[in-house]
């Protein structure tokens, strides 16, 4: 009986954490459709947070590659007074990058819904 109560408490804590994270994420970063992303990214800093090999396989025209794994040491390359548009392969890493940047004082953060996988616009690849 006590193991059932313990299991229910663990499940409740996991659900509460997931709900909190979801609403926290919605508060700090705007997740926009491809059309909205396309309308605003030219006036912003467009950052691809995927690893270099993914970036070289194809990226949105005009994007700079600052992988999530290097964001802490390369953060000085970003201006906090300009909007930052983030994307990755499917939206998970860009959300984590947005959380990190928000903690460092960046306010105008936007991510591409569905990530690069859903992008149908112009793409540049390395030869």
Image: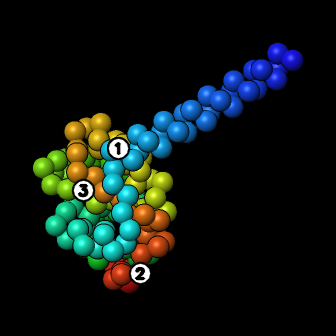
Q: Quadrant of the C terminus?
A: bottom left
Q: Position of residue 7 (x, y in %)?
A: 76, 26
Q: Which residue is mark 1?
A: 27
| Residue at screen point 24% across, 56% down | 84
Q: CA distance from mark 1 to mark 3?
A: 15 Å
Return the residue found at the far top: 2
Q: CA distance from mark 2 to mark 1?
A: 27 Å
Using residue 32 as the reference point, say whether residue 6 is left or right of it.
right
Q: Position of residue 20 (x, y in %)?
A: 48, 36
Tell me the crowding category of disc 1: few under 14, some 14 to 19, or many 20 or more residues within 10 angstroms, Cα based: few
Tell me the crowding category of disc 3: few under 14, some 14 to 19, or many 20 or more residues within 10 angstroms, Cα based: many
Return the residue found at the far right: 1
Of residues 94 and 26, the one nearer the viewer is 26
Q: Earlier in the sequence, mark 3 or mark 2?
A: 3
Q: Earlier in the sequence, mark 1 or mark 3?
A: 1
Q: Position of residue 90 (x, y in %)?
A: 49, 63
At numbered mark 2, what does the secondary structure look like: helix, strand or loop? loop
Q: Can you say whether 103 is above or below 13 in the image? A: below
Q: Which residue is mark 2?
A: 120
Tell me the crowding category of disc 2: few under 14, some 14 to 19, or many 20 or more residues within 10 angstroms, Cα based: few
Q: Which residue is mark 3?
A: 84
């Amino acid at each position: 009986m006590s193991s059932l109560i313990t299991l229910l408490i663990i499940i409740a804590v996991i659900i509460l954490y997931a709900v909190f994270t979801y609403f926290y994420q919605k508060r700090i970063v705007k997740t926009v459709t491809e059309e909205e992303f396309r309308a605003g990214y030219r006036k912003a800093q467009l950052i691809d947070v995927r690893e270099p090999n993914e970036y070289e396989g194809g990226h949105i025209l005009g994007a700079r590659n600052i992988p999530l794994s290097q964001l802490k040491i390369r953060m000085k390359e970003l201006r906090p007074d300009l909007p930052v548009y983030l994307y990755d392969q499917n939206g998970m890493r860009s959300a984590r990058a947005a959380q990190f940047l928000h903690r460092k004082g960046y306010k105008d953060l936007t991510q591409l819904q569905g990530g690069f996988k859903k992008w149908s616009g112009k793409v540049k690849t390395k030869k």
